[in-house]
Image (cartoon, coloured by chain):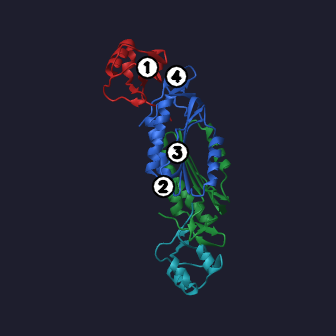
Chain colours: A red, B cyan, C green, D blue
Amino acid sequence: MKVKFFGQLAELAGVASLDVSDVDSVVALKKWLGEKYPSMSAIGYMVAVNKKMAEGDISLSAEDHIALMPPFSGG
Amino acid sequence: MKVKFFGQLAELAGVASLDVSDVDSVVALKKWLGEKYPSMSAIGYMVAVNKKMAEGDISLSAEDHIALMPPFSGG
Amino acid sequence: MEKVRKIKNIFTQGAIPASFIGDSIQKHATNHKIGGHSIFLGQVRADEIEGKPVEAIEYTTYEEMALEKMHAIREDIFAKYPLTCLHVHHSLGVVPVGEICLFVFTSSAHRKPAIEACNELVERIKAELPVWGKELFADGHQWKVNKP
Amino acid sequence: MEKVRKIKNIFTQGAIPASFIGDSIQKHATNHKIGGHSIFLGQVRADEIEGKPVEAIEYTTYEEMALEKMHAIREDIFAKYPLTCLHVHHSLGVVPVGEICLFVFTSSAHRKPAIEACNELVERIKAELPVWGKELFADGHQWKVNKP
């Protein structure tokens, strides 16, 4: 699945997006991210699945578009 | 004393100002106006004495500047 | 530090041009302490009164009293809110429908004071300034009444 | 009558020029049902962080999601308030201090709906749109944090 990084998360990851294949839920994805980018968990990011905010755990499939978003700071 | 008419009151009086000499208080002025311009009392105007709103009765002297003002409708 | 502010003229003959509003915004680009601006614009509306559309509003004022009152309102608002700037412009004379007759503009470091001050200014200007609007039709007029 | 509104692009590359705001106001002169406009402008402030002044903010977004969210907010606001118009413009990329990065513009027959809708839009835009600001110094940056 395609995972996009926004704002400070893109800076921490050093990339704008990644293809991730070995996770099947939001919780599994966060665990995977925490291992790959230990500094990311301190930021308290939100996860959107197909442009909708994911609340709690939801399962993910290969076609899903995931966005990892730090707190918004527009305006 | 100089008495200025504003808004609809100037239209009713047909003049922008008058010199009035035979009244010595706001109440007396209003009575005089009511006799001279009977339609004026229906409008519910306010009286300013020297640019300050007059509340209740106050005495007037020849040097005072009086303004007769219908409800405000700016903006 | 107490600042002594002079009495400013707020009155403009006729409508307030949209370009004047744009220019006024542009002038604030040099103040780098500003984070938010709030603007209210009053525009002359073509109300229909018994089938007759309003074509313009003609404004008159008791100018000396209005400017003293506006000065007092301005001082109150500056004392109440941490503003960097506060500007008020009101038309006199004839303003055709679709044109701007009132321009209230507040600025502050953070958005809330600018927004709250702008709202309070609009309410106070309408309630407290000795200004009168006459709604003009093709063949007559009626005196404008402000709703609270 | 239910109106189906299209998803509009709200994003502008760089600062929003003051002249654009003036032109936008001017365009509303033809709508004679409007009696009041409310405008909020966000301007980039030269905050000092440990003695270093912010020189610009660089904005990025998750554009597809932001536009869908803005569309939903717009529908909510039109359903809640009797507005004639509602316009939102937000900058992307680098906006120097003193320049405008957010322009929210509402219009209605009477002032209260325009004012309340404008305030609600500003709060929702800041809280709900996936947009991020990076505060740029001469020799570094930090990520902007919005206060509630």
Q: Are marks 3 and 4 on the same chain?
A: no
Helix, strand or loop for disc 4: strand
Question: Which residue is identified by label 1?
Answer: A3
The residue tagged 4 is: D141
Amino acid type indicated by mark 4 = His
Q: Which-is-in-front pick, marks 3 and 4?
A: 4
> Does the rendering let one see residue B43?
yes
Q: Which residue is mark 3?
A: C83
How many marks the image carries: the answer is 4
SS of the residue at dot 1? strand
Structural crowding at the residue carrying mark 1, measured as other residues with C-alpha within 10 Å and reported as few (<14), some (14–19) or many (≥20): some
Q: Position of residue A26 (x, y in %)?
A: 34, 22
Mark 4 vs mark 1: give the one in front.
1
Name the element at disc 3: strand
Is circle 2 on the same chain as circle 1? no
Residue at the disc numbered 2: D112
Q: Nearer the viewer, mark 2 or mark 1?
A: 1
